Image (cartoon, grey):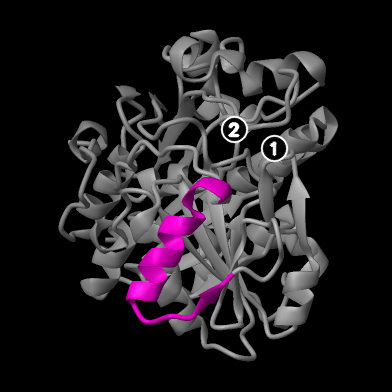
Amino acid sequence: MGKISLLVLDGFGIGAMDDCAEVKPEDRNANTYKHLREATKLKIPFLYELGLCKLVDNQGEPKAAFGRNNLAHHGADTYMGHQELMGSRPGIPQKRLMKNVSGEIKKCLQKKGYQVSHPIEKASILLVEDCIVIGDNLESSPGNIINVVCDLNQITFEEASRIGRIVRSCVDTSRVIVFGNKKSDIADILSAVTEKNGCQWGVDSPKTNVYGEGYHVLHLGYGVDFHKQFPYIAEDNHVPVYRIGKTADVIQASGFKDPVVETKDVLNTFRNYHRKAENNAVLLVNVQETDLAGHKQDVNWYKEVLEEADRFIEKFIEEMSEDDVLFITGDHGNDPTIGHSNHTREQTPLLVIGKKLKPVDLGVRSTMADIAATMAELAGVPQPEFGTSFLKEMLRA
């Protein structure tokens, strides 16, 4: 096999899911691509010719295999979207605030022999072993994520991750995130504890100086087992996996990773490692600035990032060998014109390019996990937990 690449344009949707009326009614009119095109003079001619022409305007003859992905995960989430892309079917999470679940978390940790206290009166946060603060995530919607913020000067990230997994086992929130940096000690972490929205108590992470060089993070999703995902299976079968951009943080693997953010750096890193990677390598890449622009509701920034990606993809395809395959998709929508700054529950485009592949209509896929199943078949490794391969539909005779 050749090199298998997955390029995720984070937050790039092509129309609201049919279930939005029930699941996310505020997204019923979302269409990230169409609304960007209406609000700006967006020009992404190569992606359009690859298949957006047919997917969005039902015209033209696509140059790539093309289709639409439905989201099988609940809501519209980058982390859960990537777990689905890797072959998982995330569970339906519940909204839980620390004020309601801290007692259960404390009980679970104490049963395992950990020392747990309440360091701030009236605050629902927990202090574990005097070096870890467990609280609400203040950057997401209330009740969505529990943070486990650790002082890595006092505890190893491996031990902190074990504590995070105990927390994960006793709450059904969308995510539990374990993170820390030696630059941030427990005094820094506790000084950044604050209340938000009158119901959340947690650490204001940016104030702790936790991000940047030396940052360690582990995302633990509800109903997700990375051992049954494509990257783990690939590495277990001696297929190297490279994670570039946000995939370095949200996809579990043991090989090369670079959590670079700026689009030009993401794409250049992708190109450089694609050139020197082994012939059977897998490269998982996330262009994050599309999503950041959506959150900022900045249509011009979003436009610039998409156009930069479009120019890159056109040139990159010229470098692909006879056996190389490139998948292009999104993980959810993020319509900057919809009236709110959150992700939007939209279908995502599915474009697949390779010299041995036909430009066929792949239809509407019931889950983005079909991409993982197809990559697994291409790589010649066992299938992930969920997903149905569409490789045979694309192969030339």
| 1 and 2 marks in contact (CB < 8 Å) | yes
Q: Amino acid at mark 2?
A: Phe
Q: Which one is in front, 129 or 215? A: 129
Q: Earlier along the polypeptide chain: callout 1 or callout 2?
A: 2
Say which mark, if any, is on residue 306. 1
Say which mark, if any, is on residue 224. none
* Region rendered in magenta: 99-117
Residue at 69 percent across and 56 percent down: it is 122
- Answer whether residue 103 is magenta in the image: yes
Task: Quarter of the image for the C terminus: give it.
Answer: top left
Q: Percent from the top left, x then y, of residue 142?
A: 61, 39
Read off the residue under disc 2: 12
Circle 1: element type = helix
Apparent side of residue 265 relative to residue 79 in the rendered image (left or right):
right
Apparent side of residue 246 relative to residue 68 in the rendered image (left or right):
right
Q: Quadrant of residue 127?
A: bottom right
Q: Is residue 378 above or below residue 346?
A: below
Circle 2: element type = loop
Q: Which one is in front, 392 or 129? A: 129
Q: Is residue 43 above or below residue 379?
A: above
Q: Is residue 348 above or below residue 127?
A: above
